Image (spheres, helix red, strand yellow):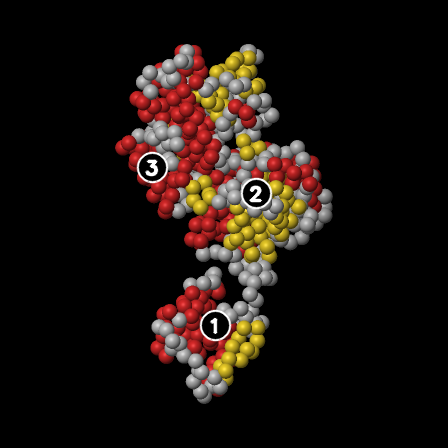
Amino acid sequence: MRSARSVTALLRRGAQQSTTKWPFRPTAEPRNNFGAVLARRFLSSGTNGESTQHRRVFGRALPNWEKTQSYRGIVLALGASGCLGGLVLVAVDGDLIPVQAFTSTDPGEGKKKLVVLGTGWGGMSFLKQIDTRQYDVKIISPRNYFVFTPLLPSVTNGTVEARSIAEPVRRMLSSTGKQVDFYESECVNIDAVNKKLLCRDASNVRVKGKEDFEVDYDYLIVAVGAMSNTFGTEGVKEYCHFLKELEDAEKIRESVVDCFETACLPHLSDEERKRMLSFVIVGGGPTGVEFAAELYDLVSEDLASLYPSVKDLVTVTVIQSGDHILNTFDHRISKFAEEKFQRDGVTVKTNCRVLKVNEKDVLVKEKATGQEVHVPFGMAVWSTGIGTRPVLTKFMKTIGQTDRRVLATDEWLRVKGCKDVWAVGDCATIEQRKVVDDIAYLFEKADIDKSGTLEIEEFQRTMEKARERYPQLEVYLQRQKFRHVVDMVKISPGDAKEKAMHLNVDEFKKSLAQVDKQLKLFPATAQVAAQQGAYLAACFNALPKKDYKPEGPERIRGEGRHRFRQFQYRHMGQFAPLGSEQCGAELPGDWVSIGRSTQWLWYSVYASKQVSWRTRALVLFDWTKRLFFGRDSSRM
């Protein structure tokens, strides 16, 4: 394959040999001629490096064209940039002579096929960072938009409109200038052996007999998210709403208005009206609590004045299986939330397990008394944990990951049990390697002189390297307030006995016995998925580089180092909106903030985190509109 520089030189020599004028001249204005139009089009075409080459060559050729109306400059530019599909043309004595086809017409030829399943936080974060010059990238998802999921509860009560937090995928891709193919379809089967995906058209307009198609891949990124977990509870799917997708939020919004409108019908009894205006939320996590707070605000600030005859019949109940709501937050935030709900009249039932969901009530068993209680509802929302999507359930069986809720990956996000498949976001969990599983290998690596015991110097050298491989070791040292790794064996640095001390295998194992207790699963949140997507893209961008120096931790079982550092989650804090313009927040540095000022911090953070200026402007407009005009209670 010839380089652009050598081809340009060849064309220039050919042009110098031409002694006659071109046998044809344009008949229209230069700006309307095919050559000029084609040149201008290619000036703006191509991606990344290609567009730069086009501009450099055509930038010199186009002015000459407009001045002399000669085809010579355009043809030279077309040939030098490879824009004629690889055909090089040289002008010799007024004739166009083909020299050599030197470029491919297929932009993806020679590139590895990289397929991304899903357009959520993990998938879109990956696509923003991936270098498409190195890969033939395709994205497959049944929805052609990205959703800012933290604001889903705000959609349920009309504080924010649904389209304000949705950004079209194709708009996001075009703004990055990357060449990515998008297929609006649902992946129904993953064949990891043959590296094929069976996909199905997800649109409402389909070609009969061609609903299914296959997509090949070399690398696969699974970022399909998760479903709500019903835990096999009877009646949940039939009678409860979920709050995972944008469509779920819109259905809840309609159902709330329907409950109020139905309760105002004249032929209903007071008991029926009361049941119709009973709202039950199963799950006291961040989503369930935020929805309960948003619902209370909607009723107290907007619907109470619109439905004065039934406003006193409204009840909101939160059912939680644990001791407290928001049990993943600091206990101060959890306590404040419970006290605020009590003041607002929101009932919180803790230590209660849902046995069954009927058409008109929820059957609950109280753990303390063992008593079964029926809680009536007009609308129920189920917000408890995450479950596996059907395509992943089938996939997990084929790779030996049965009886699991989500895919298991290693610290580099590689799916266990198959090759060339990675997973990010809610659909996967990282199984970090335990120190106790590698005790024998660590001891052997540390025992350089093969004496069967470790000197403190050997122990310290090995543990310093192990801190990089096992993140839980670093957490353990911080929580125990150990300044040095030698503190793990109950001696102080500089101790006179330090050099004389030796550790056998049992003593070595005992010093590390408590380390693995620091292991924790990452939460299923947007920021985890986004960080995983960005991390994985950085790894893929460096993967084709032959001169890339391995920067990962030293291998415990084997020689050398891992090529990349393992994924490490950096917690940026979390918010818990509690209604009435009050919010709780956990921020980095163990800083806890509660109150109205924290709510304004929530506004500013979520506005800044929007994925485009369009959605940012729409969200800010919705918040401002609500302040002046209230929430819209229309049923569309």
Q: Position of residue 594 (x, y in %)?
A: 37, 29
What residue is disc 3 on?
622
Residue located at (55% from left, 11% from top): 371
What residue is disc 1 on?
78
* Of the image marks 2 and 3, the number of the one nearer the N terminus: 2
Residue 481 versus residue 296 in the image, above or below: below
Label 3 CA crowd tier, 10 Å (few <14, some 14–19, many 20+): some
What residue is disc 2 on?
186
* SS at circle 1: helix
Query: Which amino acid type is marked by label 2?
Result: Glu
Q: Position of residue 494 (x, y in %)?
A: 55, 43
* SS at circle 2: strand
The label nearer to you, 3 versus 1, is: 1
C-beta proximity under 8 Å, tags 2 and 3 = no
Q: Position of residue 269 (x, y in %)?
A: 41, 11
The N terminus - image quarter: bottom right
For marks 1 and 2, give the CA distance.
40 Å
C-beta proximity under 8 Å, tags 1 and 2 = no
C-beta proximity under 8 Å, tags 3 and 1 = no
